[in-house]
Image (cartoon, rainbow, N blue to C red):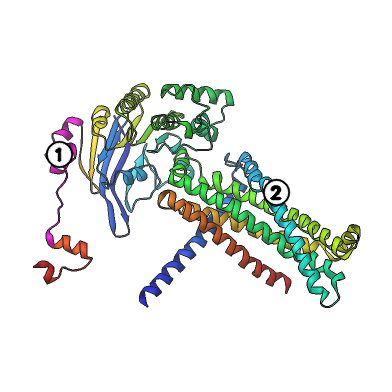
Amino acid sequence: MRNTAETIGRNTLAGLSEIGLAAVLFVESLVWLVTGPRQRQPVRLSAIAAQCVDIGIRALPIVAVLSFAIGAMVAIQGIHTLSIFGAESQVTLGIALSVTREFAPLITGILVAGRSGSALAARLGTMKINEEISALTVIGINPVRYLVAPALVAMLLMVPLLTWFSDVVGLLGAGIYVSLELGISFSAYIGELQQFCKVGDILHGIGKSLLFAVLITLVGVVNGISVTGGAEGVGRVTTRSVVHAISAIVVTDMIFTFVVTR
Amino acid sequence: MSAVIEVEKLVARYGERTVLKGIDLDVQAGEIMVIMGGSGSGKSTLLRHLLGLQAPSSGTIRLLGEDIYGITSQRLVELRRKMGVAFQGGALFSSMTVGENAMLPLREHTRLDEQTMRIMMRLKLDIVNMAGCENLMPAQLSGGMIKRAAMARAIIMDPRLLFLDEPSAGLDPVVAASLDELILTLRDATGMSIVVVTHELESAFKIADRIAVLDHGDVLVCGTVAEVKSSGSERVQALLNRRIQPLELNPEEYIRRLTGGPVSDGARA
């Protein structure tokens, strides 16, 4: 009993300590973004560009495939459910809101966490094991400015853009199925989308994606720099970062939806 | 000569374990100081403290006259421009070429144009016998080349202090000897002070002006090679002659360690 209480207490403290570290890294990254140029130590644009390509451009194919499939899936389920009430013609409303407000940001967040969050944790973990982070420090280069801030900026740019892309492809996938199944023209489907889908719905999803971007970066970084135990440790923190990031995304999504929707 | 590194009463603790027990040490300008000791003696911890990577539990470290744990972070960055470090594994950035690795401090701390930086980089690579290797990636290098490339990066800013962590560890005797020669050449050519952490006796005796022998977090002896060799300390002699040190535990303590508790009567019997 005492051991269990000790374990819970220790894990709680470790969790709080990681949250504290994440908050410090976030603030420090923002400070470097603002004050770096004045100190002649700007956050490197080349690193941001490289990370944007990695996080955003290279993720386009997989985001497209999954978003298309999920859009079509929402349409299939929507038509099936609404047909019980003879209201399948109202399916576009459900598609527009569920894709833009929920599915696009969620699926994009989960994909980026799996692809780029894990890569960030693995990269930083490997750098720490190889003493590259210590090397940066002794060269006089702040590792937060050099490694964390570019990743944060790239995530904040790319995750919302990918979410918007996911919106478009998801609605396209749904539209193709709706047109074929209900026999309405694609332009009529677009017209309904314009009627039901407001800018606020799209911004709702984009707003979530900004939060997800911060979460994915910080979870990846905190796990990466806390690595211990060589290559095995890197594998462990990589897996841990994916699990933590996806959990954080889903819980944050629920809280965001609760706060904004009510 | 004046001291460029002054360590006073340095104590490092991890929880209840004391790794460094009040170390006093100084390194003079232009001197090669070798820090020696067996595994777990505290030499790597001492190096991390000297590099400003780990704050001491107590005590002070002054590099070039400045207390590195008492100055602002900006001042520490300026101080670090006068330091070069080559880590044991090289710590080359795997996404950059050898040339980019070597030029990184110049890119970050100077406003030199690209051509000048490239000339300086090639010069330093030439000094460490790596001429023509600037376009290679770290993954393409041998162990000796990695250490040389790390050394090129460490000296690119012409530092006043150079720290080398196990420069010849894991290398064949010929490559290790050539690195020793390189260290001596660097000191003679530039007058920089060099701190070398190693457990390679042959290398230490060849390059050291003075040697500090660490054991269980204490400096057992600090002096010239001759002084260290003639030390009356049993532990120093054991290290120099590669003798296995006897386990300094009485049977009761040994049994207590194994069982993780107080010694029972049965165990005593």
Q: Give the residue at the far left of this rendering.
A: B269
Residue where numbered disc 2 is placed: A61
Q: Is residue B249 magenta?
A: yes
Residue where numbered disc 1 is placed: B237
Q: Residue at x 69, y 45 (%)?
A: A57
Question: Between residues B190 and A64, which one lies in front from this camera angle?
Answer: A64
In the displayed structure, B80 sits above or below B69; it is above
Helix, strand or loop status at disc 2: helix
From which residue to which does the magenta span run? B223-251
Q: Quadrant of the N terminus of chain B?
A: top left
Can you see residue A100?
Answer: no
**Residue B12: assigned label:** none
Horizontal side of residue A203 vs B105, given as left or right: right
Can you see residue B81?
Answer: yes
User: Which amino acid does the dot numbered 1 rest on?
Assistant: Gln
- Locate residue A77, reporting x and y percent: 76, 69
